[in-house]
Image (tube, rainbow, N blue to C red):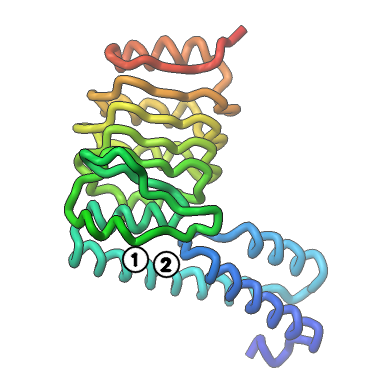
């Protein structure tokens, strides 16, 4: 067993790693890899020769957490419906939602803690979603892909939103009117054509995308593909 060949120092490092994981689990229930774990694995790779046990441990833990979270939200969906279970997922990620015919938002605080008052509106459709600065990624849209009434969605400064994530947005093609992708540093011009399915889109903000070079050309192409949409992008000059 790999555990037996670990040195005393390595076992101590693993204990510290498990402690940090427990703290991270208390702070957030996220299916994405937390930055603290990435930094710690980098530290292990630089200072220890045998890091495979740590990597295997991380992979096993990640799969277990993903399976547990998927099961949890599947049960919530069966009990409360897709809108309420999606609201729970968005709030858990650190985002916010506004329900139909409601003026106030339900939001998480800086520690991703939130009120459970949204359960008083079970079945009420979600009209606006704010996932700005959260760690949502491609798999996250499995939990919110059944929403039929979302008109506004903000993915501003989401570090893991990439071209593949944009392909998931076709689920909102019958309702989405306003989409903000500002600061999504992984989005390129190859992914933007996936947005052409959003025929009801009226506003598209794609400012601050460093991987898009010819911004003026992209603006023309997107406006041609979505003639009723106002495309916001920086001046190429």
Q: Is residue 72 above or below residue 192?
A: below
* Left or right, residue 231 beside residue 21: left
Q: Is residue 73 above or below residue 54?
A: above
* Left or right, residue 229 beside residue 146: right
User: Residue 210 location, x and y as percent?
Assistant: 60, 27
**Which type of secondary structure does the marked residue at label 1 adopt?**
helix
Residue at 50%, 17% in the rendered image:
233
**Which type of secondary structure does the marked residue at label 2 adopt?**
helix
User: Residue 47 location, x and y as percent?
Assistant: 82, 69
**Disc 1 marks which residue?**
70
Which quarter of the figure is the N terminus placed in? bottom right
Residue at 19%, 67% in the rendered image:
79
Residue at 78%, 73% in the rendered image:
49
Does any portion of residue 171 appear in the rendered image? no
Does any portion of residue 106 appear in the rendered image? yes
Callout 1: few (<14), some (14-19), or many (20+) C-alpha neighbours within 10 Å?
Answer: some
């Amino acid at each position: 067993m790999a555990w037996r060949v670990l040195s005393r120092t390595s076992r101590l490092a693993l204990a510290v790693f498990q402690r940090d994981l427990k703290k991270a689990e208390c702070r957030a229930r996220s299916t994405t890899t937390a930055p603290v774990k990435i930094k710690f694995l980098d530290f292990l790779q630089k200072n220890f020769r045998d890091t495979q046990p740590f990597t295997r441990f991380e992979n096993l833990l990640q799969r277990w957490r993903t399976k547990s979270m998927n099961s949890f939200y599947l049960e919530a969906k069966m009990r409360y419906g897709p809108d309420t279970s999606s609201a729970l997922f968005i709030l858990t990620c650190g985002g916010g939602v506004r329900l139909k015919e409601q003026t106030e938002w339900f939001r998480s605080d800086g520690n991703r803690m939130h009120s459970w008052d949204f359960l008083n509106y079970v079945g009420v459709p979600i009209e606006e979603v704010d996932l700005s600065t959260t760690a949502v990624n491609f798999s996250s849209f499995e939990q919110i892909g059944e929403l039929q009434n979302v008109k506004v969605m903000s993915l501003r400064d989401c570090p893991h939103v990439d071209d593949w994530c944009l392909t998931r947005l076709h689920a909102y093609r019958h309702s989405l009117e306003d989409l903000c992708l500002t600061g999504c540093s992984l989005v390129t011009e190859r992914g933007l054509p996936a947005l052409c399915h959003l025929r009801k889109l009226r506003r598209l903000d794609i400012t601050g995308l460093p991987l898009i070079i010819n911004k003026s050309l992209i603006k023309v192409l997107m406006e041609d593909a979505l003639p009723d949409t106002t495309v916001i992008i920086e001046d190429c000059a």
